[in-house]
Image (cartoon, grey):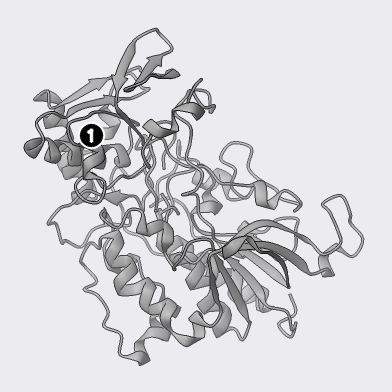
């Protein structure tokens, strides 16, 4: 894209990666406009502000954002500490969004409903690469407006599109009508949503660290609320992957989680049901009946869907995308992040060339760029947007020089459903640990679960 273009560049999403994209564009002399569906920056992370990350602060800060914050008197956090989601917002994202350079370009309560080329649907070719984009946005109050922009960076994450509870990638029969019995993917069991779980039969579905977090928190709640019955359903034949590597785990905080959950299962505090592929949810007057494909049935008052996330591609329907058929990431990135073969520590650094689509000057970044794969890191996303900003500014040489040093992280790969940026349960660990940590935790490294992995990222 010609850096002299007078049109702004749309950034979809004001999470960590979206805000970093805006800062890198500003450093390149380009004009961003940021559309955030929520009421504030980091709105998706706000849903799991009670969760602590696996990764320390030093992996969660973007260098360009820090350069913008430093002259303002901003106090950087202790780089070896493990932040909660709320701290990620309060100590980093909120101060960044409040800066005039960002705040004046941030539109909150602005949900992007479609992206296309001005006057062209995806079937038209002539002049496509030089035609501006139209970003259709539903603003607060229901007003819908079209915004004309020179390029689009989609950093909207995956928090809004969780995987279904059913098998084969489909919702279980009756899942849509049981929504009143299904919680959010990372409920605040010990805080804001405590009353929804006290004295209830709670079924947690999934084998990733979102499930692990929730189960451990439910066990804590059960100490004060003895009427709780905690059920855990996993599709696999065992829960070993959810328990992780224990003392051998490259991420100590994560290893502690798995060991704690194993002890809760062995003590009978958590009732584990393996090989439980959900086929049907039947809404009854007082609860929901959850039936497995083999005929087994569990009765629950609340179901927690720790089943992972997938990208919402509907808003991009009129764009020419080239996506990996398995993980729904950009086609060149897909084989590099397939969770069956790669972990967050083995995915090579990548930038604009790998993220490019046939649609010129359009990029998906952050957790959404990883599609259904769970191994996304905030640090990876920051390098993505640095490269993309350079490419949009016409500096292809800088865009092509991608660097990202990540330490080894033990059993970070194929962990049955958790992003490397997945939130961790509360722990007092404050050690210098590896790479892992909305949504986008995600989530942001985000939480994931049952089938392939998470969050989102963030």
Please indicate, yes or no, whether residue 350 appears anywhere in the rendered image. Answer: yes
Q: Where is residue 347 drawn, in percent x and y? A: 46, 52
Residue at the far top in the pictured view = 295
* Residue drawn at point x = 47 percent, y = 40 percent: 162
Q: Nearer the viewer, residue 115 or 336?
A: 115
Give the answer, above or below, for where 24 lies relative to 122: below
Give the answer, above or below, for where 358 lies relative to 127: above
User: Which part of the image, by quadrant, shows the N terminus?
Assistant: bottom right
Q: Could you say which quadrant of the image residue 139 lies in? A: bottom right
* Residue drawn at point x = 59 percent, y = 68 percent: 11
9 sits left or right of 428 in the view: right
Please indicate, yes or no, whether residue 403 appears anywhere in the rendered image. Answer: no
Which residue is denoted by mark 1 in the rendering? Answer: 243
Q: SS of the residue at dot 1?
A: helix
* Residue drawn at point x = 89 percent, y = 56 percent: 125
77 sits left or right of 64 in the view: left
Give the answer, above or below, for where 84 lies relative to 334: below
Q: Nearer the viewer, residue 74 or 48?
A: 48
Q: Where is residue 156 drawn, in percent x and y? A: 54, 58
User: Which part of the image, by quadrant, shows the C terminus?
Assistant: bottom left
């Amino acid at each position: 894209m010609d850096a002299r273009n007078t049109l702004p560049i749309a950034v979809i999403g004001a999470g960590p990666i979206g805000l970093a994209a805006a800062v890198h564009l500003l450093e390149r002399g380009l004009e961003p406009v940021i559309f955030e569906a929520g009421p504030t920056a980091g709105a998706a992370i706000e849903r799991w502000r009670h969760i602590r990350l696996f990764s320390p602060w030093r992996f969660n800060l973007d260098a360009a954002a820090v350069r913008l914050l430093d002259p303002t008197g901003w106090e950087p956090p202790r780089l070896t500490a493990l932040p909660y989601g709320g701290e990620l917002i309060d100590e980093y994202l909120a101060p960044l969004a409040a800066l005039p350079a960002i705040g004046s370009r941030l539109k909150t309560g602005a949900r992007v409903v479609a992206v296309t080329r001005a006057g062209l649907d995806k079937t038209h070719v002539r002049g496509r690469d030089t035609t501006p984009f139209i970003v259709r946005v539903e603003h607060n109050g229901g007003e819908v407006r079209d915004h004309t922009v020179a390029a689009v960076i989609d950093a909207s994450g995956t928090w809004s599109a969780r995987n279904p509870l059913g098998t084969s990638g489909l919702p279980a029969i009756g899942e849509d009508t049981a929504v009143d019995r299904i919680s959010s993917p990372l409920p605040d069991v010990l805080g804001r949503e405590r009353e929804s779980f006290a004295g209830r039969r709670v079924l947690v579905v999934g084998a990733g660290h979102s499930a692990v977090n929730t189960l451990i928190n439910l066990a804590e709640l059960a100490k004060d609320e003895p009427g709780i019955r905690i059920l855990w359903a996993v599709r696999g034949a065992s829960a070993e992957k959810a328990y992780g590597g224990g003392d051998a785990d490259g991420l100590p905080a994560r290893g502690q989680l798995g060991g704690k959950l194993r002890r809760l299962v062995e003590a009978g505090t958590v009732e584990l049901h393996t090989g439980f592929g959900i086929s049907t949810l039947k809404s009854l007057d007082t609860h929901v009946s959850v039936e497995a494909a083999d005929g087994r049935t569990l009765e629950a008052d609340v179901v927690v869907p720790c089943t992972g996330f997938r990208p919402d591609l509907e808003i991009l329907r009129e764009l020419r995308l080239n996506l990996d058929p398995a993980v729904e990431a950009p086609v060149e990135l897909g084989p590099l992040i397939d969770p069956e073969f790669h972990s967050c520590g083995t995915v090579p650094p990548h930038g604009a060339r790998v993220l490019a689509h046939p649609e010129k000057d359009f990029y998906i970044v952050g957790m959404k760029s990883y599609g259904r794969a769970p191994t996304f890191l905030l640090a990876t996303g920051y390098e993505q947007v640095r490269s993309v900003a350079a490419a949009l500014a016409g500096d292809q040489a800088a865009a092509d020089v991608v660097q990202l040093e990540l330490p080894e992280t033990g059993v970070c790969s194929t962990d049955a459903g958790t992003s490397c940026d997945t939130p961790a349960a509360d722990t007092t660990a404050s050690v210098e640990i590896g790479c892992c940590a909305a949504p986008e935790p995600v989530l942001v490294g985000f939480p994931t679960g049952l089938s392939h992995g998470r969050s989102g990222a963030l």
